[in-house]
Image (cartoon, rainbow, N blue to C red):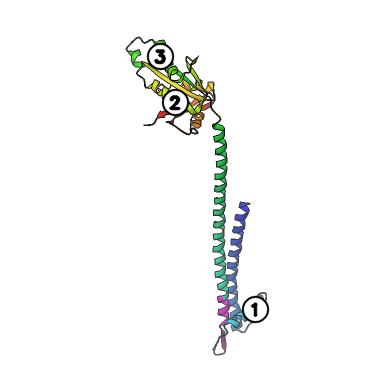
């Protein structure tokens, strides 16, 4: 429909341009018709347009009928009046072309405004639908892997990693009262309320920032997507709390957000890619 309307405006302007050419052509023919009358001649080839010119000259004569005599030659100024009338029509056509351009611009602006309004309304509906679905997601999992800090390994200092892991688990249990299960040589914690994740993150950041001889790779994944969680932890981003894009997106819908998120990068995950983000403390 929009294309047809634009073509209609274009066709209208083309027609008006054709009328302008006709006006110029009429003026040229009228000058020839005037010369014919000055010579008291009759040119048969002008017979097709003579009735129209006679009507136009009669109308012009009613408007202005002054004549000038030069010997036997009479200059009737009604011809000039007729030419002025044609020029007025020419000018009126120019105005119509200008108005058609204004009308087209107005139509296009109105259409764009309506389209933007419709898109905003549709986006609002889609956003509300997505928000409703995202807020239904409550379950999430946390997977923690540890390693001895390289500085202790290089110095060949004997660190009991099992004892350090037990201390970590005891600290987390004391704060969150959650017991992990062993997964991927790490510890998997399952939680039931994503709205309370900031409390969990506070504890996890204390683990990372603690003065222990271990580094901690921590990954979080919503909806217990264990395969994706395993991929996240396999990237071994130590001393970071990482997550996939879906978890980061879900966090946006928490009313209160104590932490910020940022993208770490995009990594290959089989035939697909995995967009990895991290939780960060506000600076």
Answer with left or right where residue 75 lies relative to residue 175.
Answer: right
Residue at 62 percent of width and 78 percent of height: 56
- Residue bounds of the magenta highlight: 73-84
Q: Which of pointers 1 and 2 lies earlier in the amino acid sequence?
A: 1
Asked if one can make out residue 220 in the rendered structure from this viewpoint, the answer is yes
Q: Residues within 10 Å of mark 3 (few under 14, many from 20)?
A: few
Q: Secondary structure at mark 3?
A: helix
Q: Residue 190: percent from the left, percent from the top?
A: 51, 20
Rendered image quadrant of residue 85: bottom right
Q: Which one is in front, 220 or 107?
A: 220
**Residue beneath label 2, please?**
199
Which corner quadrant of the image does residue 33 belong to? bottom right
Q: Which mark is residue 89?
A: none
Give the residue drawn at x 60%, y 69%: 22
Residue 177: x and y, percent? 47, 18
Q: CA distance from mark 1 to mark 2?
A: 94 Å
Q: Is residue 200 above or below residue 13?
A: above
Residue holding disc 3: 167
Q: What kind of element bears circle 2? A: helix
Q: Earlier in the sequence, mark 3 or mark 1?
A: 1
Tag of residue 55: 1
């Amino acid at each position: 429909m929009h294309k047809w309307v634009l073509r209609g405006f274009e066709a209208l302007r083309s027609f008006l341009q054709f009328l302008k050419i006709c006006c110029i052509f009429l003026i040229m023919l009228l000058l020839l018709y005037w010369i014919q009358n000055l010579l008291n001649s009759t040119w048969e080839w002008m017979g097709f347009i003579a009735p129209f010119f006679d009507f136009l000259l009669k109308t012009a004569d009613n408007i202005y009928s002054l004549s000038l005599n030069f010997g036997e030659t009479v200059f009737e100024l009604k011809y000039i009046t007729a030419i002025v009338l044609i020029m007025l029509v020419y000018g009126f056509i120019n105005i119509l072309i200008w108005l058609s351009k204004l009308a087209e611009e107005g139509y296009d602006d109105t259409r764009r405004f309506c389209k933007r309004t419709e898109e905003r309304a549709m986006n609002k509906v889609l956003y509300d639908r997505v928000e409703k679905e995202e807020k239904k997601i409550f379950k999430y999992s946390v997977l923690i892997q540890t390693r001895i800090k390289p500085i202790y390994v290089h110095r060949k200092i004997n660190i009991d990693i099992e004892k350090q892991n037990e201390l970590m688990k005891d600290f987390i249990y004391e704060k969150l009262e959650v017991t992990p299960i062993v997964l991927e040589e790490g510890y998997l914690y399952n939680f039931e309320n994503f709205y309370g994740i900031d409390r969990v993150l506070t504890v996890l950041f204390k683990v990372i920032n603690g003065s222990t001889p271990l580094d901690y790779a921590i990954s979080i994944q919503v909806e217990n997507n264990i395969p994706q969680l395993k991929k996240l932890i396999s990237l071994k981003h130590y001393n970071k709390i990482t997550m996939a894009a879906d978890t980061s997106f879900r966090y946006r819908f928490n009313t209160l957000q104590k932490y910020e998120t940022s993208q770490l990068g995009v990594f290959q995950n089989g035939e697909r890619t995995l967009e990895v983000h991290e939780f960060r403390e506000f600076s």
